[in-house]
Image (cartoon, rainbow, N blue to C red):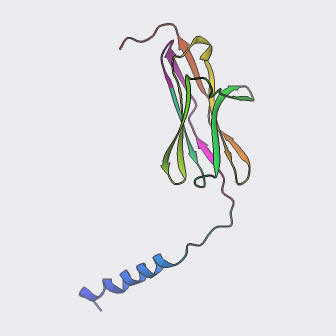
Amino acid sequence: MTGIGTPVPRLLFLLLISLLPAVSSKEPCITSVIAKKSFTSIPVGGALSLNCSVLHCGPGSWSGEWGWSDLDNFSPLNLSDDRVQVTVIPVRETQTTLQLTIQNMMYNDSGEYQCRVIGTELNTSNMGHMTNVTVTGKERAY
C-alpha cells in the first residue's frame, strides 16, 4: 500500500513499542568524573570558581566533595568556612555539575584542588583531575 495509508501502521507500531516496559540492565552503575587538569591564577581577595562534571545513575546514587590534594592525600575542604561554597547543579537526570566557589582568596589558598565522587551502589570513589591554583599579589582592577 502506498500513499496516505503507509505511515499509519508505522505510527501505531512506534506507539505500541513506546508503551512496552523498558528492559533494565543487570550491570551495576558506575559513577565517574569529568574534569580537566588545569592551572589558574587568582588575585588575592578575588573569587575562585571550579567545576567538575559528575556522571551518575540518578538522584541519590552518588555523593561528592571538593578538597585539597597533596600527592596521594585528599583532604575535604572545610564547608563551615563562610568563604567556601559547594553547589550541586543538575544538568540531566544522570549528570550533575559540582561547583566549588571560594570568596576572598588568600595566599594560603594556593594549592591543588580536586573533586571526589563516591558512587553509592558499589561504594566506589573517583577523583577529578587536579587544578593547580596560585593566589597572586594584586587584585584585578575592574
Count the numbered circles shown: 0
Q: Quadrant of the C terminus?
A: top left
- Residue 102 appears at what percent x and percent y? 54, 24
Q: Quadrant of residue 135?
A: top right
- Residue 17 appears at what percent x and percent y? 47, 79
84 or 6, which lies in front? 84
Q: Is 109 within the magenta?
A: no
| Residue pictured at 68% horizontal, 27% vertical | 69
| Residue pictured at 64% horizontal, 67% vertical | 25
| Residue pictured at 48% horizontal, 78% vertical | 19
In the displayed structure, 68 sits above or below 6; it is above
137 or 106, which lies in front? 106
- Residue 44 appears at what percent x and percent y? 51, 12
Name, please, the residue furthest toward the bottom.
Answer: 1
Q: Quadrant of residue 140?
A: top left
Name, please, the residue furthest toward the left.
Answer: 3
| Residue pictured at 53% horizontal, 49% vertical | 95
Q: Is residue 139 left or right of residue 142?
A: right
In the displayed structure, 138 sits above or below 85; it is above
Q: Is residue 80 left or right of residue 125?
A: left
In the displayed structure, 65 sits above or below 55; it is above
Q: Quadrant of the N terminus?
A: bottom left
Q: Is residue 29 left or right of residue 46?
A: right
Q: Is 39 within the magenta?
A: yes
- The residues colored magenta run 28-48
Name, please, the residue furthest toward the top.
Answer: 137
